[in-house]
Amino acid sequence: MRSRFAENVDRLAADLAAMCTGVESMMADASRALMSADTHLAEQVIATQEECDSAARQWEQTAFALLALQAPVASDLRLMIGGMHIAADLERMGALTTHVAEAVLRRHPAHVVPSEAHGILADMGRVAVAVAGETHRVLAQRDPVRAAALERADSEMDALHRALFERITSDRWEHGVMEAVDVTLLGRFYERFCDHAVAIGHHVVFLETGLAGDAEEGSAGEPLQRPR
């Protein structure tokens, strides 16, 4: 019985990594759609979101069923509880990719990305896909050292986010308020996408070591709000 339970736990861990692969693919497609104003590709990303949501719900249901029918040890409980947080983060990352894709459709036939912001947003898409790929490797290997490094990888996205804001607020910005709002939101979607990846890294550290990271507590031991 215990060996069957261990197999189910390992399968749940593998399912989280598989969900992350799907999110990585969604972000890659959403970023390509954004840069090329490809409405067909954008629609494909939006249609995939239901699969992401369904996978997260199925993961939680399976985890609850195992908890109800077995007597898990501490490490198993950490996987179940931390995994639920990870599944929620992955679901939110998927939703953020659809927000990027929806911007393409919302401004069609116009291109939502002005030329002045094209390079920075292209870089933000590249970094988001790379961070998602590294998050997949963290989940597949359950490596706490690699998980902790996700926060450092996020620093490049933070720098791009600042650069984008500076570009929008510069006197050289030749577009209107609507374009500035669109670009600001897009930058926020990318930035929050990576924040959720960092939160997943914190959860993996907790799963493997039992030590709560910044995703669990603040410096004074106070709970932090989850990324949205």
Image (spheres, rainbow, N blue to C red):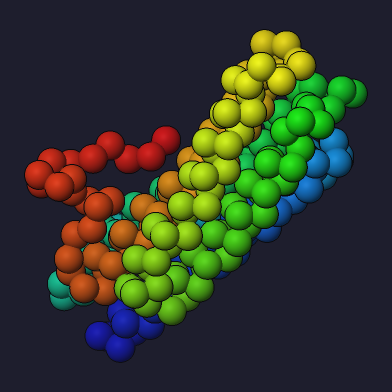
Which residue is the extreme one toward the front?
171
The residue lying at 37 percent from left, 61 percent from top is 201
Residue at position x 61%, y 33% from top? 164
Which residue appears at 25% of the width and 85% of the height? 2
Q: Is residue 3 left or right of residue 100?
A: left
Rendered location of residue 213, percent (x, y): 23, 58
Residue lying farthest to the top in this orientation: 177
192 versus 56 height, above or below: above
Q: Is residue 134 left or right of residue 29?
A: left
List the single residue furthest toward the right.
Answer: 109
Point out residue 66 in the picture as x, y percentages from the top left corner. 30, 67
Quarter of the image with the C terminus in it: top left
Residue 90 visible in the snapshot: no
Q: Is residue 67 left or right of residue 30?
A: left
Question: Which quadrant of the figure has residue 64?
Answer: bottom left
Q: Residue at x 63, y 46 (%)?
A: 124
Task: Say above or below: 66 vs 93.
Answer: below
From where the camera sits, is residue 85 visible? Answer: yes
Residue 93 x, y percent position in the rendering: 52, 46
Look at the image and tell me in which quarter the N terminus lies. bottom left
Vertical relation: 6 (above or below) 107: below
Q: Is residue 168 left or right of residue 212?
A: right
Q: Residue furthest left?
A: 220
Q: Quadrant of residue 9?
A: bottom left
Q: In front: 93, or 1?
A: 93
Decide which of 102, 217 is in the foreground and name it: 217
Counting labels gives: 0
